[in-house]
Image: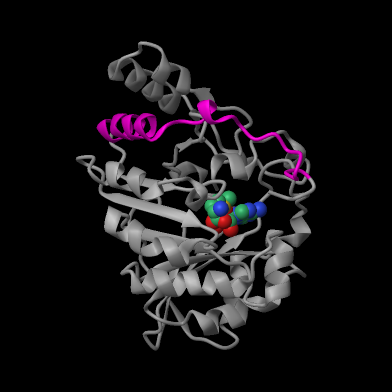
Amino acid sequence: MPKEVFGRDYVFLPRHQILSFEEMTRLVRVFVSLGVEKVRLTGGEPLLRKNLPDLIRALSEINGLQDLTLTTNGAALSALAGPLRAAGLKRLTVSLDALDDEIFRGMNDVDFPVARVLAGIDAAVEAGFAPVKINMVVKRGVNDHQILPMVRRFQSPHYVLRFIEYMDVGNTNGWRMDEVISAAEIVSIIEQEFTLEPVAANYPGEVAKRFRHRDGGGEIGLISSVTQPFCTGCTRARISSDGQLYTCLFASTGHDLRSLLRDDSDDQKITEVIRHQWLNRTDRYSELRTTATSTMPKAEMSHIGG
Ligand SMILES: C[S@@+](CC[C@H](N)C(=O)[O-])C[C@H]1O[C@@H](n2cnc3c(N)ncnc32)[C@H](O)[C@@H]1O
C-alpha cells in the first residue's frame, strides 16, 4: 500500500461495509461444504483487525476445515503469536523482503524496523508455529543481493524460506519484466553457496516448488508465478474484506457475496452462486502476461490479499 496512494487522506471503507466475524464464519462454512479444506487469512494486514483471535477460534471450530493459516507483515506478531496459536491457528507465513533495515523499509514503505519482524518470527516459533514460512519477493537491483543473507539466516528446520517472483499485481506497483528475477536464477544464486535437492509437492496444485538443504538445514520454496505460471492447477478463491469473491489474483472485478449474506438468501442460495462462479471461471492471466497486460486494470493486492 504505497504511501503516495494510500496516504493520510485516503478514505478507507466504513466499518459496515466490511464483513463481520459472523459473516466470514458463515461464508467459510459454506465454502467448506463445497469441498474447501484450507483457509488463509491475509490482507491488507490481518493482525490489524481487532479481536482477531476470536475469528480464528470461530473458524477453527468449523467441521471439515483442515488447515487454517495466515500471512502477516509480522509487525504485531510478538504480542499476537501466542494468542493466535491458543485460538487454533495452525500455520503462519511472515513476509520479509530483506534483512538489511534500509532495504526492508524502502521496499515495504513502513515505519518499523526489520528487528521488529525478526522478533515476531522468534515469537511465532516459540508459540509452536515452526516451521514458519518466510516470504521474500525478489526485485532485481533492489533486494537480490539479500537472497544469500536470507538463506543463511533462515537455514533451519524452524523455517521454510520462500522466494516469490515479483508480480505485476494491482495498478500501483509500476511493474517491469526486467525487474523480475526468475526462480531458476534465484536457485542458481543460492547454489553458489548451498547444496539443494528437490522435494516432492505436498499436494497437487501446491504453488511453491520445494527444495531442501542437503545438510538437513530446512526447506526453501520457489514461487515462479511469472516465468512458470500455474493457472491450470490453481485452486484458489479469494474473498475481499468487503465480501467480493475473486477467482483470480489478477481479476479486475469480484462477485458480490456480501449482499447475499445481508439479504434473506439462505446458505443453499449462497452455495449455488459460489458454485456457478467457480465452475464458470476462465481466468488464466499469468499464462497471458506481457508487459502490455501489466497495465490492465486489476484489483489491488492489498484488497485481495496475495
Ligand atoms: C499482499 S501481502 C498481505 C498480507 C500481509 N500484509 C503481509 O505483508 O504479508 C501477501 C503476500 O503478497 C506478497 N506480495 C506483495 N506484492 C507482491 C508482488 N508484487 N509480487 C509478488 N508477491 C507480492 C507479499 O510479499 C506477501 O507475502
Q: Residue at x 31, y 39 (%)?
A: 36
Q: Is residue 5 above or below residue 82?
A: above
Identify the coloring: one colour
Residue 260 versus residue 184: which sits nearer the camera? Answer: 260
Q: Residue at x 19, y 40 (%)?
A: 63
**Residue 52 appears in view:** yes
Outermost residue to the left: 63
- Ligand 1 found in image quarter: bottom right
**Residue 228 appears in view:** no
In magenta, the rendered stretch is 5-34
Q: Quadrant of residue 9?
A: top right
Q: Was residue 136 drawn as part of the magenta stretch in this picture?
A: no
Query: What is the x, y in percent for residue 135?
Result: 53, 64
Residue 13 versus residue 186: which sits nearer the camera? Answer: 13
Q: Is residue 273 above or below residue 126?
A: above
Q: Is residue 110 left or right of residue 24?
A: right
Outermost residue to the top: 264
Q: Is residue 126 above or below residue 252?
A: below
Q: Is residue 187 left or right of residue 11?
A: left
Q: Is residue 8 above or below residue 265?
A: below
Query: What is the x, y in percent for residue 34?
Result: 29, 31
Query: What is the x, y in percent for residue 296?
Result: 73, 35
Query: What is the x, y in percent for residue 206?
Result: 41, 54
Q: Residue at x 44, y 45 (%)?
A: 233
